[in-house]
Amino acid sequence: MSADVQLENVWVQFGDFVAVRDTSLTIQGGEFFSFLGPSGCGKTTLLRAISGFQEPSRGRVLIGGKDMAGTGPNQRPTALIFQNLALFPLMSVWENISFALEVKGVNKSVRRKKADELLELVALPGQGDKMVDELSGGQKQRVAVARALCAEPEVLLLDEPLSALDLKLRQHMRTELRAIQQRAGITFIYITHDQGEALTMSDRVAVMRQGTIDQVSDGTIVYDRPETAFVASFVGENNAFPGRVIEVTQGIASVQTKSGVLHAEVSAVSPLTSGDAGIVFVRPESVRFADPSALQNRLEVTVANQEFEGHFWHLVLQTAEGSVIRMSVMNDGERETYEIGSRIAVSFTAQGAIALAQGELAAE
Amino acid sequence: MTSARVLRLAVGFYILLFFTYLFGPLIVMSFTAFNSSEFPSISPWNCVTPEWFGVLFKDQHLMGGLRSSLLVGIGVVLLAVPIGLAASLLITQLQKRARSIVYTIAISPILVPGVVLGISTLVFWERIDRVVLGVEDSFFYDGYFMTIIGQSTFIAAYAMLVFLARLQRFDPGLEEAALDLGATHTQVFRKILLPFLKPAIASAAVLAFLASFENYNTTVFTIVSKSTLTTVLASKVRYGINPSISALAVIIIGLTLVGAVIHEYLRRKEVAKTEALAAEGLPAPTRSRSGNRVLRVPVGALASLIFVAMLATAWIARDYDVAQCKVQVTEENRKKFDALKQQRLAEAKAKREANRQDADVAVETNQAGRQYQNIFAPTNLGSQIDSTEPSEPDSDATTAVETNQAGRQYQNIFAPTNLDGQVDSETKDE
Ligand SMILES: Nc1ncnc2c1ncn2[C@@H]1O[C@H](COP(=O)(O)OP(=O)(O)OP(=O)(O)O)[C@@H](O)[C@H]1O
Ligand SMILES: [Mg+2]
């Protein structure tokens, strides 16, 4: 069972402070939908509005087509995995998991059986009789997932449920969650700080900034075709060259920057015209060592630093005017290394870069 | 001697002084419970005796007071703890302004003198009886009822403080989580909040009971014609006490110690459990332990001290006969008295010779002198009786004196003739 979730012009205000601003969004039933955004941008607040803990100041929340105004959290077909988990410390693991059944008056043996099944599912078999205190952080998170699943919600809301796990376990839980979601066909609404997580797991990603949603689309589009300067700078790494648009021809903009005139594709969604303030964004992996023949988007730089990260080399380059360019080079074992301080030339193609209107950038 | 050592010595001395101040009275009182002397005292020490415990249990007044204290205490627990719980829950739900108003109102009975609470409770319920019910002194004007109500006004506030302290550590997220999983508000209260508050309910109940048990100021007004332990004790002090009160104190101290040891035992078990968890490398629930360690030492030391004292008593008591001891003490006292009498007589004789007066007149002077010293004592009459017939105990006089004895001793305690008085009263004993 799954239900779609619709937000219609939802506002959430705390006194004068606007935590969520005029947000409209439709999340399909059975979709794995992620919210991505910096800390304090209103992700948790939005989840609380969906799960019923926070009445919107304005606008409507609909679940399965029904207006949820006045429906308390215990009557909504949602289950929320809290950012701090909120496991019941005085109950054992299995009692925690089967709490949703207990309040329905289901008898103990049935509850125990269901709890054991769910423990199996979250890879914690035989841990049902422990107290919550006795679990590690990662185990607690898995218990929280199991507890929410036990309520058999139509919409599962997850507020950074994997943040406390180590990398291996996180990867395991990601695939596990994805599998659970596909098996149960539940709508998952997922909040994360981890962009990789959002991009790999989700059908669609919403990028939030200060209470508003900047862009909603699938992961590759968010990464490759950001629609605002904020999304471009927040999702993944990006080199930014602010300047003024000189001309736009055939979807390629020429922008006058401190590092000279740079050429980049224009976003179809937010077009630019000449005279606009614009920014050219280039991903580190799109920066190449310049062929002698390459004349477009060519930059003369000095190697300021280089970091080795297994399959990649990360180079920090400095232009003559002092701007910093990051560049990632695949570690294919053939590359000659550069001394720090050596002067090289790099370039990128117009297709590998994107020009967007100037706007707020994500904080580093 | 280094200055650090001086400091350590000074600190040790201070601690000794402090504990003496803290426990000295209790220890002295405990000893008086075992002295056969009629008045609670350790010096002069007469005989070791358990008889005061018997006297205590036979004292209908005290036992009746104890019973009603227990009754009132239970009533107060049943009334004050739920009220305190409700108030604390209300306060945590309220917003800033309303919260501080309700808090102030709930806490105010603690600040009002108990006497005022007592009188106002009395007046209020008497009025209710008269004006609202149209009856006189019958329905609400009942000692138990008014005492429970009166004490609960401020004891509920104590309970509320206990609950508030606990609620401050409650994670409201748990409430939300339970709601989210489909629990109703009632279920949240029963299954989440109440289990969390359980330890606080226990402490609040104990606190409420103890506060009720020891309350005097309010109770003395609201209890009307009945009496609780505290009011009985107060009236006893007025009319003269005997060591059965110390015996009661020993029992109460003993119960407290047993309670403390049990509590300590349970707590240590808990600590051991968390430490075992920590040893497994799992996160233990954070809990400060340093505070408890400080407590552990005096409680343990006191408990073992008492144990040793009991052993020693048992050892001494092996071939010890109270009756015999008493006879012995009486004998000694009589000897002392006789010696004193001889001395007095000799003095009188000397005086008589000096003044060339009659022997009878000399004795009278002597008596008058003693009376003079007692002139402000309310039992003056009693002492007159026994001073006129000091050496030949007469059964009538003895009973008359006995009823008064304890009181007289008490009033004479600072009188210069104290020793004499004690000597005669002991003589009279048989
Ligand atoms: N109950 C509240 N009262 C006042 N302000 C609030 C309240 N809850 C949240 N806020 C504010 O709303 C903003 C958004 O908070 P929210 O918890 O939704 O952030 P978030 O995106 O979940 O951040 P994080 O990633 O750090 O969890 C924050 O600035 C926060 O201070
Ligand atoms: Mg959050």
Image (cartoon, coloured by chain):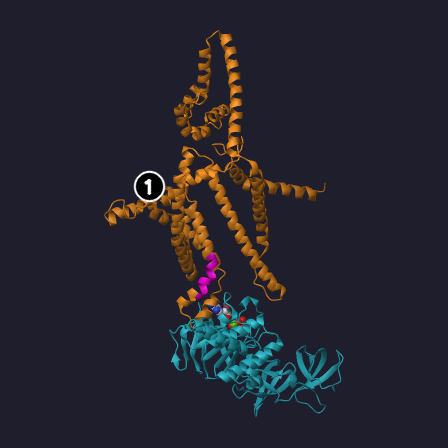
A223 shown above or below B208: below
Closest to the observer: A146 or A197?
A146
Asked whether B139 falls inside the magenta stretch, the response is no
Residue A53 appears in view: no
- Where does the C terminus of chain A fall, quadrant-wise? bottom right
In the rendered structure, the answer to whether residue B112 lies left or right of residue A149 reads left
Where does the image place residue A234, in percent across and percent down from the top left?
57, 78
Helix, strand or loop at disc 1? loop
Q: Is residue B275 visible?
A: yes
Q: Colour of chain B?
A: orange
Q: Nearer the viewer, residue B405 or B315?
A: B315
Which residue is more in the foreground, A113 or A4? Answer: A113
Instruction: Examine the structure image and report whether residue B196 is included in the region drawn in magenta.
Output: yes
Query: Measured from the top left, where is residue B77 in percent x and y?
Result: 41, 52
Amino acid type at mark 1: Ser
Q: Residue furthest left?
A: B134
Main SS of residues in magenta: helix
Please name the residue shown 44% across and 39% down the image. B56
Q: Nearer the viewer, residue A166 or A42?
A: A166
Based on the displayed image, in which of its 4 quarters is residue A5 positioned?
A: bottom left
* Horizontal arrangement in the rendering, residue B41 relative to residue A71 (left or right): right
Q: Residue at x 44, y 14 (%)?
A: B364
Q: Position of residue A335 (x, y in %)?
A: 74, 86
- Residue A298 percent location from the top left of the image: 68, 86
Magenta span: B191-200
**Residue found at the far front of this picture:** B319
Q: Quadrant of the N terminus of chain A?
A: bottom left
The chain letter corresponding to cyan is A
Mark 1 belongs to which subunit? B
The residue at which mark 1 appears reads as B225
